[in-house]
Image (cartoon, rainbow, N blue to C red):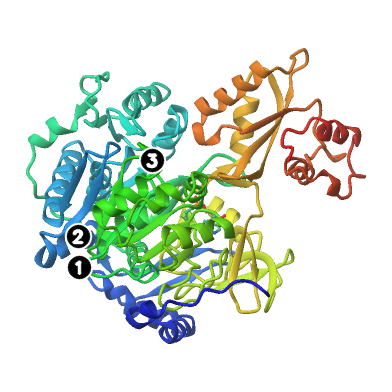
């Protein structure tokens, strides 16, 4: 196909845990007899009671049910901490790098054990028990991981809400899962600026019925003054002084929920994705080991925030289950300078580095100099996640950051999948810039056309999974029917990812992006429906339609078409006001990049907005609008083109 292929470096091939022949053999075994394969690999974690059942899954049509290792009993915190104490108690578990380069902490497995037990006791003293939901609204400090693991230790279910979400978004997520306890910090610190986390929690709780939440535990990060409500709010340091540093890990069934994580879809409000304990942990740990070729002595750094699934699986659960040293970074790539990532790599001798294309593109914009000024000699494997990586960014990452020496694993997965599904393995897979290449063990991708016909060979279509894998989400919190509708109804009998893809003649997968109404802004998922409903809640807005458009750094930008109420006039001031409105309503990540005031939106005669046309105009490709003859008022299109905001 004329595309570039980068062979596996000889040094990698020779020493890798999985070489090409092993990949083929294991992959083949994993799809021929999944129960035997996972029955064996499930034993990589400790079980208080070993499972005898491995797989019990059905994708419908009709009933959808996903259970792995169902009669086994385990605990995720035990697996991430206690079982390492005998062999690596003094090894660093969490290496924390502060926003300020002068601040760092190294927490050994033994210290992690004490910290997590203390946090668990603080929660337990406030009534948290097995099955209870706990909302975490935290900055990137070790206490965020302690709190997650403390919940896991008690069998409580954590729901981490990204610190960039607004009080309204936080309130919806607290109420959605009925958590009665929130863990937060006084303030977060990013790029030298404070984030008012506790104040946001106060604002969120003010929107909920008075008796919704019993306790707010506040970790001191900046020491900034915050309001404390007597009887409800307590500082973590004070509460922790009153408890011991031991707390037994509560045995839970494999299918007991470990966490839920709210994520955006193409319709309605965000849904609580439910992940359970046994299968999730096995899958997160196994992918972490093999995808990054993780070994003893590695210093592994994933730059995600724990507010997203990447932070759950590849900062906390996968690495810690493997006894890794996982680096947690509080700051941003550009503070104090654009060399920060590479300075941190040198300072901590990072060997594996995992980040998002948007970060790579923004740093690429600053040129090679800030990278070349650092050594990066410790790096062995580079990773990418969150959105398609364009070949230019791939190339720069490979050539400049990795000095042409380090394989890049372009890992495709989703909040729903729990762990990486399609990816190269460093010692086994030759790379093609822009392709996520091959399925991980046990993963069975299928490409289907609009009629659910499976396409063979080289093809392009909708990316589905034919069968379950242990890390798969189990349900939507409180709404199993929504789970079935969202993922198993478009293509009955299969899990539909919402992504489109191309498969080339070598069987390599190229993710082409979402085919539903979800946009991917800087690797963060945003439902267009959510942004629309925020815009129409503004008193001057009558109608809104939101689409994505290509953005040089963010991957996709948010383009909003807005129709104003009768008598309201478009203005620059109003444009700014609407951006600020969405920012405040949902959070900065949802703020529209471009707003076009439109006297009318293109609709069919039955009143359905034709998004296809809006997408084309937003992409500045209005010469190929296709058939517009079914529009109720074809003239609105001319106005939209005339006043388009993205002109290349
Ligand atoms: O469109 C795909 C894109 O991100 C979506 C999942 O978003 P989220 O649940 O927030 O999880 C992000 C981190 C796992 C997918 O449906 N995506 C993720 N990784 C890639 C990707 N697109 C292309 N290539 C990737 N490597």
**Label located before the other in sequence (3 or 1):** 1
Q: Quadrant of residue 67?
A: bottom left
Compared across the picture, whether 570 is left or right of 230 comes to: right
- Cβ–Cβ below 8 Å for labels 3 and 2? no
Task: Tell me the residue at 55%/67% (across/down).
Answer: 59
Question: Which of labels 3 and 1 is toward the front?
Answer: 3
Density class for disc 3 (Cα within 10 Å; few <14, some 14-19, many ≥20) is some
- Looking at the picture, tell me which residue is in the foreground, 112 or 648: 648
Q: Is disc 3 placed on a helix, strand or loop?
A: loop
Note whether residue 252 is visible. Answer: no
On the image, the x and y values in percent for residue 619 come to: 73, 44
Image coordinates of residue 202 in percent, x first then y, are 35, 23
Is residue 22 positioned above or below 327 on the image?
below
Q: Label 1, on which residue?
A: 48
**Residue 639 in which image quadrant:** top right
Residue under label 3: 332
Label 1 beta carbon within 8 A of ligand 1? no
Label 3, label 1: how many angstroms apart (C-alpha)? Answer: 40 Å
- Quadrant where the N terminus sits is bottom right
Number of labelled discs? 3
Q: Is there a contact, CB below 8 Å, between mark 1 and mark 2?
A: yes
In the image as oriented, which residue stretches furthest toward the top? 567
- Can you tell which mark lies on residue 78? 2
Element under disc 2: helix
Quarter of image, res 277: bottom left
Give the mark nearest the N terminus, 3 or 2.
2
Q: Nearer the N terminus, badge 1 or badge 2?
A: 1
Q: Position of residue 216 (x, y in %)?
A: 26, 30
Of circles 1 and 2, the one toward us is: 2
Label 3 residue near ligand 1, CB within 8 Å: no
């Amino acid at each position: 196909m004329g595309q570039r292929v980068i062979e596996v470096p000889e040094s990698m091939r020779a020493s890798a845990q999985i070489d090409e022949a092993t990949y083929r053999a294991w992959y083949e075994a994993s799809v021929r007899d999944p129960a035997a394969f996972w029955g064996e690999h499930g034993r990589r974690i400790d079980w208080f009671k070993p499972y005898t059942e491995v797989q019990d899954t059905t994708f419908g049509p009709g009933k959808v049910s996903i259970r792995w290792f169902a009669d086994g009993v385990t605990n995720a915190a035990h697996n991430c901490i206690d079982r390492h104490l005998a062999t690596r108690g003094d090894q660093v578990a969490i290496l924390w790098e502060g926003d300020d380069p002068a601040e760092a902490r190294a927490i050994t497995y033994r210290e992690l054990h004490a910290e997590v037990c203390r946090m668990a006791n603080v929660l337990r003293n406030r009534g948290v028990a097995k099955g209870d939901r706990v909302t975490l609204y935290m900055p990137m400090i070790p206490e965020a991981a302690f709190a997650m693991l403390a919940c896991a230790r008690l069998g409580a279910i954590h729901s981490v809400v990204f610190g960039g979400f607004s009080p309204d978004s936080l309130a919806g997520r607290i109420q959605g899962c009925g958590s009665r306890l929130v863990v937060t910090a006084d303030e977060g610190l990013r790029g030298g600026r404070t984030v008012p986390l506790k104040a946001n929690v106060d604002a969120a709780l003010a929107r909920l019925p008075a008796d919704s939440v019993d306790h707010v535990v506040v970790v001191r990060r900046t020491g900034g003054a915050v309001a404390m409500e007597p009887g409800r709010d307590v500082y973590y340091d004070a509460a922790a002084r009153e408890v011991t540093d031991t707390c037994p890990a509560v045995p839970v069934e494999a299918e007991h929920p470990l966490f839920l994580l709210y994520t955006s879809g193409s319709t309605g409000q965000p849904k609580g994705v439910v992940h359970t304990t046994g299968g999730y942990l096995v899958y997160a740990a196994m992918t972490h080991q093999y995808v990054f070729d993780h070994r003893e002595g590695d210093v592994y750094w994933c730059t995600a925030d724990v507010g997203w699934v990447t932070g759950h699986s590849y900062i906390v659960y996968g690495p810690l289950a493997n006894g890794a040293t996982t680096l947690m970074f509080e700051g941003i790539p550009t503070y104090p300078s654009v060399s920060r990532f590479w300075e941190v790599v040198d300072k901590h001798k990072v060997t594996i580095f995992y980040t998002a294309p948007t970060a790579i593109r923004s740093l690429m914009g600053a040129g090679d100099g800030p990278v070349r000024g650092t050594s990066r000699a410790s790096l062995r494997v580079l990773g990418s996640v969150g959105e398609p990586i364009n070949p230019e960014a791939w190339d720069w990452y490979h050539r400049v950051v990795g000095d042409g020496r380090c394989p890049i694993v372009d890992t495709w997965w989703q909040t729903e999948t729990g762990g990486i599904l399609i990816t190269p393995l460093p010692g086994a897979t030759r790379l093609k810039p822009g392709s996520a290449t091959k399925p991980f063990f046990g993963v069975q991708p299928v490409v289907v056309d609009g009629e659910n016909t499976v396409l063979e060979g080289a093809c392009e279509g909708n990316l589905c999974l034919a069968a379950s894998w242990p890390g798969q989400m189990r349900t939507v919190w409180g709404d199993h029917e929504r789970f079935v509708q969202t993922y198993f109804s478009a293509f009955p009998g299969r899990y539909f990812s919402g992504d489109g893809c191309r498969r080339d003649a070598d069987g390599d997968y190229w993710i082409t992006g979402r085919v539903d109404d979800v946009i991917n802004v800087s690797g963060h998922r945003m439902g267009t429906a959510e942004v629309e409903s925020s815009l129409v809640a503004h008193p001057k807005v009558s109608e809104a339609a939101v689409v994505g458009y290509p953005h040089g750094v963010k991957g996709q930008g948010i383009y909003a078409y807005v129709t104003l109420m009768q008598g309201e006039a478009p203005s620059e001031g109003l444009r700014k006001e609407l951006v600020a409105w969405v920012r405040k309503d949902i959070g900065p990540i949802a703020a529209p990049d471009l707003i076009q005031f439109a006297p009318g939106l293109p609709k069919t005669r039955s009143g359905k907005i034709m998004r296809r046309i809006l997408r084309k105009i937003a992409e500045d490709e209005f010469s190929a609008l296709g058939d517009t003859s079914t529009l109720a008022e074809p003239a609105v299109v001319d106005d939209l083109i005339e006043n388009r905001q993205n002109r290349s």
